[in-house]
Image (cartoon, rainbow, N blue to C red):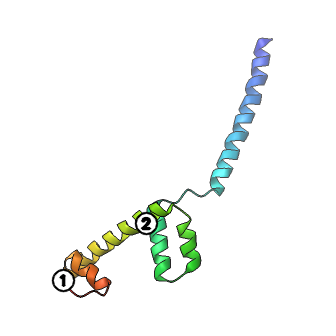
Amino acid sequence: MWGRVRGIGSRVTGRWRTEERAGREERAGREERPHNLFEAAAAYVSACAEDDQDRIDEAAGWVSPEALSFGVNELACRAVIALARERDESPGTVARALLGLPAA
């Protein structure tokens, strides 16, 4: 008798777990993964370059202002280094040229 009860319980529990797992998978398919600060910074800077206020606002909402600031700073550093290597100039010279400042 206890074998039958256990069997029924196993089937009910198994069905419940299958439905729960299917529900989780369905929700996971709809939910987007959270954006990281570098994705936010890249989207924010490219939107600023294209003067797209809607995209600027969207990217700014992905992470905290502090995280966005850090990401934009990191992107700027990497961009200056990449341009300096490409131009065979110092990062300081490239940064000043990008900002329209006279050579030091």
Q: Secondary structure at mark 2?
A: helix
For residue 12, side relative to residue 44 (left or right): right
Choose the circle earlier in sequence order: 1 or 2: 2
Calculate the distance from the C-alpha at mark 1 to the C-alpha at mark 2: 27 Å
- Disc 1 residue type (three-letter): Ala
Above-or-below relation of 88 to 58: below
The answer to whether 89 appears left or right of 47 in the picture is left
Residue at numbered disc 1? 104
* Depth order, front residue of 104/37: 104
- Which quarter of the rendering shows the N terminus? top right
Residue 39: x and y in percent read 47, 65
Q: Is residue 60 above or below residue 51?
A: above
**Location of residue 69 in the rendering, given as x and y in whole percent from the top left corner:** 43, 66
Are dots 1 and 2 in contact, CB under 8 Å? Answer: no
Q: Residue at x 31, y 70 (%)?
A: 77
Residue 69 - label: 2
Q: Is residue 39 placed above or below 5 in the rendered structure?
A: below
